[in-house]
Amino acid sequence: MSRIVSRSTSAVSGMIGGAIAGAIFKQIWKFASGKDDAPQATSDEYGWREVLIASAVQGAIFGVVKAAIDRSAARSIHRATGK
């Protein structure tokens, strides 16, 4: 039972984390570049440098948000179940 709860919590927290990370990235990109949208990797409008920087920043933000949410969820499950 604990395993099912853990997996369900992980899936939900992953979706929430992705949405939060996306919103944070969008705001940071807008502030840093002055543009509303980040460059898409397939767009000819942007150069390699801008595309790779955007991807690196987005990945870093996603990683931090995911780790924070996963850690928080794990601690909550541990408190609730004792495991």
Image (cartoon, rainbow, N blue to C red):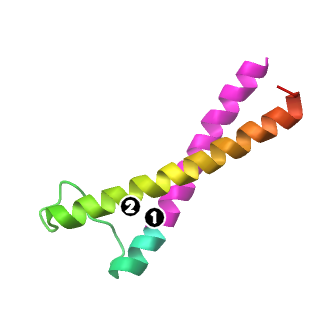
Q: Residues within 10 Å of mark 2 (few under 14, many from 20)?
A: some
Judged from the image, the secondary structure of the residue bearing numbered disc 2 is helix
In the rendered structure, the answer to whether residue 13 lies left or right of residue 57 reads right
In the rendered structure, the answer to whether residue 80 lies left or right of residue 6 reads right
Would you say residue 24 sits in the magenta stretch?
yes
The residue closer to the viewer here, 64 or 22, is: 64
For the residues bearing labels 1 and 2, Cβ distance under 8 angstroms: yes
**Upstream in the sequence, badge 1 or badge 2?**
1
Examine the image and state in which quarter residue 6 appears. Answer: top right
Residue 77 image offset from top left, x and y in percent: 79, 34
At 63% across and 50% down in the image, what residue appears?
Answer: 68
Q: Quadrant of the C terminus?
A: top right
Kind of residue at badge 1:
Phe
Kind of residue at badge 2:
Val
Residue 49 image offset from top left, x and y in percent: 19, 65
The residue closer to the viewer here, 5 or 83, is: 83
Residue 22 image offset from top left, x and y in percent: 48, 58
- Residue, disc 2: 57
- Residue, disc 1: 25
In the rendered structure, the answer to whether residue 68 lies left or right of residue 45 reads right
In the rendered structure, the answer to whether residue 42 lies left or right of residue 9 reads left
Give how far apart the Cα atoms at labels 1 and 2 are: 8 Å
Q: Which residues are magenta?
A: 1-25
Would you say residue 63 sits in the magenta stretch?
no
Q: How many marks?
A: 2
Residue 48 image offset from top left, x and y in percent: 15, 61
At 36% across and 75% down in the image, what residue appears?
Answer: 36
From the image, state whether disc 1 or disc 2 is nearer to you: 2
